[in-house]
Amino acid sequence: MLNAYSLSENGPLLAVASNGEVVPEEATWIDLHQPTRDEDLAAEAFLKASLPTREEAQEIEFSSRFYAEDGAVFMTASVLTGVDIGKPALVPFTIVVAGNGHIATLRYEELRAHKQFLARATKPGSGCATTPSVFFGLIEAIVDRTADVLEKISVDVDRINEQIFTSRADKRRGRRLSGLMEGIGFQGDLAAKARESLSSLERLLQFASASLPSIYSKGANKDRLKLIARDVRSLEDHVAFLSNKILFLLDATLGLISVEQNEVIRILTIAATIFFPPTLIGTIYGMNFDIMPELDWGWGYPLALLLMLASAVLPYLWFKKQGWL
């Protein structure tokens, strides 16, 4: 799908939902979502530059994601998507700033940050009247969305922390801890993807400051670029903190599970030790030898029972005295 927007004081105005044949002349910004071949050709004619394919946009080399060609600057960042449905993924999001003053965005998945930007930009007084304001607004929307994801991670990690270190007398604690491992793994994966997304945004901003036309790095735009870069770095610090906390919770959970398992083994070992002497005595008197004097004694059976009881009680009292029970 190709949507073309003209820019005015009221923000981006939808010029046409194009079928890919022609982009209207009044358009300044075009947004391509899973474009067809015809839409690609129309966008390339509009920008006077070739668009990267999906495979090229997904490459991780710096030179494949950030470059200048045909008088246009191409920048691709990895953006988080699918967080709300529990299937987080990183997808490429390409911004093209053409030499003729036009701008284009290329994406292959629905991005919540993109929707949030459009919702804000179309309101009066949004300030999205120029291509630099669209560029910075899109980046700010992605940063804001990433910040929301980190806040969600922080809340979920605190909840997991509380579940790990409370209810220590719970008899099902071992099973509950094992169940929490899945949640810890999910949060760790989400934090890693958020960190990768922020790293790609930081590289994009560095490349933009050096490669975009001077209008993007002068006056208020220069201050805006620096502010976005500071926000990205602060979020990187925060996601590093969250990653360390998640690793701590993972280590703590594994340690507590190990303690629970050792406790079970300790109880089984003590029980086996306590019942071993009575078992030995019972085994001895269960042998089928002809000459066993105790078999003819009147008190032989009660004595055997007494010996078995004493051999079980004495180890129990000893373990109790040593504090092992």
Image (cartoon, rainbow, N blue to C red):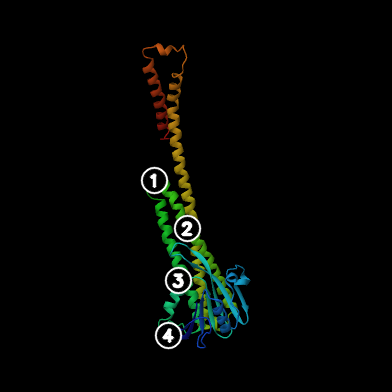
Left or right for 48, reference 309: right
How far apart in space, not on screen, are marks 3 and 1 (Cα)? 40 Å
Which of pointers 3 and 1 indicates the residue nearer the eye? 3
Label 4 crowding class (10 Å Cα cut-off): few <14, some 14-19, many 20+? Answer: some
Q: Which badge, 3 or 1, is on the more N-terminal residue?
A: 3
Mark 4, residue position: 10
Contact? badges 3 and 1 (CB < 8 Å): no
Residue on which disc 1 sits: 172
Relative to 99, is 233 above or below?
A: above
Name the N-terminal-most of marks 3 and 2.
3
Which numbered disc, 4 or 3, marks the residue that appears first in the sequence? 4
Looking at the image, which residue is at 44% across and 25% down? 279
Rendered location of residue 301, percent (x, y): 38, 17
Return the residue at label 2: 186
Q: Which mark is residue 83?
A: none
Q: Which numbered dot is residue 112?
A: 3
* Circle 4: residue type: Asn
